[in-house]
Image (cartoon, grey):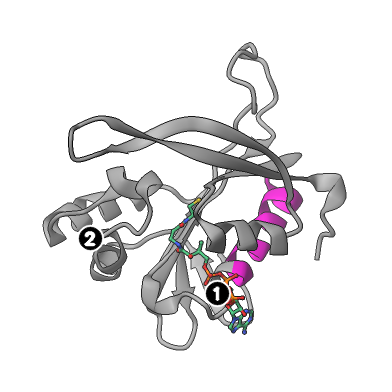
C-alpha cells in the first residue's frame, strides 16, 4: 500500500467493482478501448482478475471516502523487445486513468508521483517511459509535471480503433521518459 496526502494506492478488491465500472464503461481514450466493460458482471470478472495483482497494479483510492477514482499500473520489462531472456527487467511503462469526475484536481499527479517513487525506490526501476497520443494533452502535461523528457514522436505508431469504414485509425504517439538518476527519491 502507498499513502499520499489525499490518496491510497492499493491492490484491487472485489468491492471495487462498481467504481471500476463507473470509469471503464466508457474509456475516455482510444488506447484503453480494449478495456471497455459492458456490464457490471464484466466489471466483477475484471476486478477478480486484478485482485491477484499485488505489486504492480493499483487502485487509486480517495482517503476521505474510500472511493476508487482510477488506477495506475506498470510492469517490469527489458525496454527492448529483441533482448535475450537474461535481460534485466528494469524498464516500466505506466498506464494511468482517472474517473472523469476527478480530473483537474491534481490526483493523477499525486498518485503517479508516489508510484514513480515506489518503482524507483523499491522495485528496481532504472527507466520509466510513457506513451501518449499527440492529442492527449492532459497526459502529456502529467508526464511533464513528473519531470519526464519528451523523447520522440512516433508517426502513425499504433491503431486502437477503426473508423466508420472499418479502416484502422493510426495514432501519432509521443514517448516520454525519466531515469532513476534524474528522479529525487522522497
Ligand atoms: C491523464 C489523466 C490521468 C490526467 O489527469 P489530471 O487530473 O488532468 O492530472 P493532474 O492530477 O496532474 O491534475 C492536473 C490539473 O489539476 C489542477 N489541480 C487542481 N487542484 C490541484 C491540486 N491540489 N494539486 C495539483 N493540481 C491541482 C491543476 O491545476 C491541473 O489543471 P490544468 O491541467 O488545467 O493545468 C486524465 O486526464 C485521464 O484519466 N485521462 C483519461 C485516461 C488517459 O488519457 N490516460 C493516459 C493514456 S496515455
Mark 1 within 8 Å of ligand 1, using the beta carbon: yes
**Residue found 29% across the figure and 55% down from its top:** 47
- Against 72, residue 150 (above or below) is above
- Against 86, residue 106 (above or below) is below
Q: Position of residue 37 (x, y in %)?
A: 21, 54
Q: Of helix, strand and loop, which mostly describes the magenta segment?
A: helix
- Write down the residue under mark 2: 25
Q: Position of residue 114 (x, y in %)?
A: 66, 64
Q: Is residue 143 left or right of residue 171?
A: right
What are the residue bounds of the magenta stretch? 109-123
Residue 86 figure quarter: top right
Label 2 packing within 10 angstroms: few (<14), some (14-19), many (20+): some
**Residue found 71% across the figure and 64% down from its top:** 145
Q: Is residue 34 left or right of residue 40?
A: right
Q: Nearer the viewer, residue 57 or 155?
A: 155
- Write down the residue under mark 1: 107
**Residue found 38% across the figure and 72% down from its top:** 100
Which secondary structure, mark 2? loop
Label 1 packing within 10 angstroms: few (<14), some (14-19), many (20+): many
Q: CA distance from mark 2 to mark 1?
A: 21 Å
Q: Is 171 part of what is drawn in magenta?
A: no
- Against 19, residue 73 (above or below) is above
Q: Nearer the viewer, residue 26 or 126?
A: 26
Residue 3 figure quarter: bottom right
Which secondary structure, mark 1? helix
Amino acid at each position: 500500500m502507498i499513502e499520499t496526502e489525499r490518496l491510497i494506492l492499493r491492490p484491487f478488491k472485489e468491492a471495487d467493482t462498481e467504481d471500476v465500472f463507473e470509469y471503464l464503461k466508457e474509456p475516455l481514450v482510444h488506447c484503453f478501448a480494449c478495456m471497455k466493460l459492458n456490464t457490471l458482471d464484466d466489471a466483477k470478472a475484471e476486478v477478480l482478475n486484478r485482485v491477484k495483482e499485488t505489486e504492480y497494479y493499483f487502485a487509486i483510492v480517495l482517503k476521505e471516502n474510500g472511493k476508487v477514482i482510477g488506477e495506475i499500473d506498470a510492469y517490469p520489462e527489458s525496454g527492448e523487445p529483441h533482448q535475450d531472456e537474461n535481460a534485466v527487467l528494469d524498464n516500466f511503462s505506466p498506464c494511468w486513468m482517472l474517473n472523469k469526475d476527478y480530473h483537474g484536481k491534481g490526483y493523477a499527479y499525486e498518485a503517479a508521483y508516489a508510484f514513480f517513487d515506489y518503482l524507483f525506490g523499491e522495485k528496481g526501476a532504472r527507466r520509466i517511459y510513457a506513451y501518449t497520443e499527440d492529442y492527449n494533452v492532459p497526459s502529456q502535461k502529467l508526464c511533464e509535471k513528473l519531470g519526464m523528457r519528451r523523447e520522440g514522436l512516433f508517426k502513425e505508431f499504433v491503431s486502437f480503433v477503426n473508423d466508420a469504414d472499418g479502416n484502422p485509425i493510426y495514432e501519432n504517439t509521443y514517448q516520454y521518459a525519466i531515469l532513476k538518476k534524474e528522479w529525487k527519491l522522497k
